[in-house]
C-alpha cells in the first residue's frame, strides 16, 4: 500500500507516520506539509512546500497512492471564522479535489474531531466548519472516504502537539491519562490506535463513513 500523509508533523500525524513506517503492508509513505518531519526511513519521501492551496506543479508526485491520511489542522480559539474556514475547509478541499481525479482508487481519511456538526448549523464555529469539510469530502469521487472524530488523545511515543497551549495541557494531564484510559478505554484513544485504525480502514474499509472514538478503537483492535 502506498500512503500519502498531510500534517505528519502534528501530534496525530506523528503517530500516524510512525504506524505507517512500521507496517509491513505499507510500501511507500509520502508526507506533504510546510515543514520536514525530521524522520529518516527507507520507505519515507517528503514534499515540503509553503503553498498548500495549489498543487498543479506537483501533480505527477501525487499520483499512484492507495490512501491519503489527512491529519493537518489548526486550533480555532481566537481565530476569525473566515480565517479558520480558509485554513480548515480551504486547505483540505484543495488537496482532496486535486487527489480525487488523480487517484480513483484512493481511500481518503480525514481527522476532524468529536463534536463535529454535520448539519453545519450549530453554534460552535469550529464544529460547523469541520462539518462542512466532512460533508464536502464525502461527495468527492474517492473509492471511499472516512471521517475520524477522536476526542481525547493520548500521545504514546513522544508525539507532541504544535500548539503551545495544548502541549501544556498534555503535560499537566499526562499522569491522569493512563488511569482515565483504563476507566474509559473506548473514549480515550492513543496516537498509535489512530494510526492503526487508519491503516485498517484504508485496507479493509469500515461499516460507517463517520467514525467516533469507539469506532476508531474497534478498527485499531482489528488490525
Image: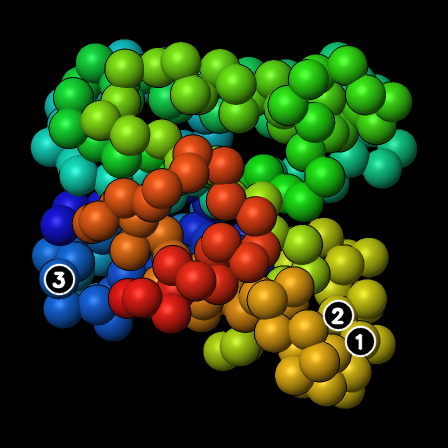
Disc 2 from disc 3: Cα separation: 32 Å
Q: Residues within 10 Å of mark 2 (few under 14, many from 20)?
A: some
Pointer 1 residue: 173
Q: Residue at x 65, y 64 (%)?
A: 187
Pointer 2 residue: 170
**Residue 137 relative to residue 67: left or right:** right
Asked which secondary structure carries label 2, the reply is: helix
Q: Residue 128 in the image: x percent, y percent?
A: 72, 22
Q: Earlier in the sequence, mark 3 or mark 1?
A: 3
Colour mode of the rendering: rainbow
**Residue 52 relative to residue 56: left or right:** right
Q: Nearer the viewer, mark 2 or mark 3?
A: 3
* Res. 33 in view: no
- Given residues 62 and 144, the one toward you in this image is 144
Disc 3 from disc 1: Cα separation: 34 Å
**Residue 152 relative to residue 1: left or right:** right
Cβ–Cβ under 8 Å for marks 2 and 1: yes
Q: Residue at x 81, y 67 (%)?
A: 168
Q: Residue at x 68, y 73 (%)?
A: 184
- Which quadrant of the figure has residue 79? top right
Cβ–Cβ under 8 Å for marks 3 and 1: no
Q: Residues within 10 Å of mark 1 (few under 14, many from 20)?
A: few
Q: Residue 63 in the image: x percent, y percent?
A: 14, 28
Asked which secondary structure carries label 1, the reply is: helix
Q: Residue 162 in the image: x percent, y percent?
A: 65, 54
- Given residues 210 and 40, the one toward you in this image is 210
Pointer 3 residue: 25
* Res. 65 in view: yes
Q: Residue 88 in the image: x percent, y percent?
A: 61, 26
- Which quadrant of the figure has residue 40? bottom left
Asked which secondary structure carries label 3, the reply is: loop
- Which quadrant of the figure has residue 87? top right
Amino acid at each position: 500500500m502506498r500512503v500519502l500523509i498531510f500534517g505528519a508533523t502534528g501530534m496525530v500525524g506523528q503517530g500516524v507516520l510512525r504506524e505507517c513506517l512500521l507496517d509491513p503492508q505499507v510500501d511507500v509513505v509520502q508526507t506533504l506539509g510546510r515543514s520536514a518531519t525530521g524522520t529518516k526511513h527507507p520507505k519515507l519521501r517528503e514534499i515540503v512546500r509553503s503553498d498548500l492551496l495549489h498543487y498543479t506543479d506537483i501533480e505527477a508526485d501525487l499520483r499512484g497512492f492507495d490512501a491519503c491520511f489527512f491529519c493537518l489542522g489548526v486550533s480555532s480559539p481566537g481565530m476569525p471564522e473566515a480565517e479558520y474556514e480558509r485554513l480548515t475547509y480551504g486547505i483540505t478541499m484543495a488537496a482532496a479535489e486535486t487527489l480525487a481525479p488523480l487517484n480513483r482508487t484512493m481511500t481518503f481519511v480525514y481527522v476532524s474531531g468529536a463534536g463535529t456538526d454535520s448539519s453545519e448549523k450549530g453554534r460552535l464555529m469550529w464544529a460547523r466548519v469541520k462539518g462542512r469539510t466532512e460533508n464536502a469530502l464525502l461527495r468527492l469521487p474517492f473509492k471511499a472516504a472516512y471521517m475520524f472524530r477522536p476526542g481525547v488523545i493520548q500521545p504514546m511515543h513522544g508525539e507532541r502537539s504544535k500548539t503551545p497551549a495544548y502541549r501544556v495541557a498534555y503535560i499537566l494531564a499526562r499522569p491522569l491519562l493512563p488511569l482515565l484510559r483504563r476507566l474509559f478505554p473506548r473514549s480515550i484513544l492513543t496516537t498509535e490506535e489512530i494510526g492503526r485504525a487508519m491503516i485498517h480502514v484504508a485496507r479493509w474499509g469500515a461499516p460507517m463513513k463517520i467514525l467516533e472514538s469507539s469506532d476508531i478503537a474497534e478498527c485499531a483492535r482489528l488490525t
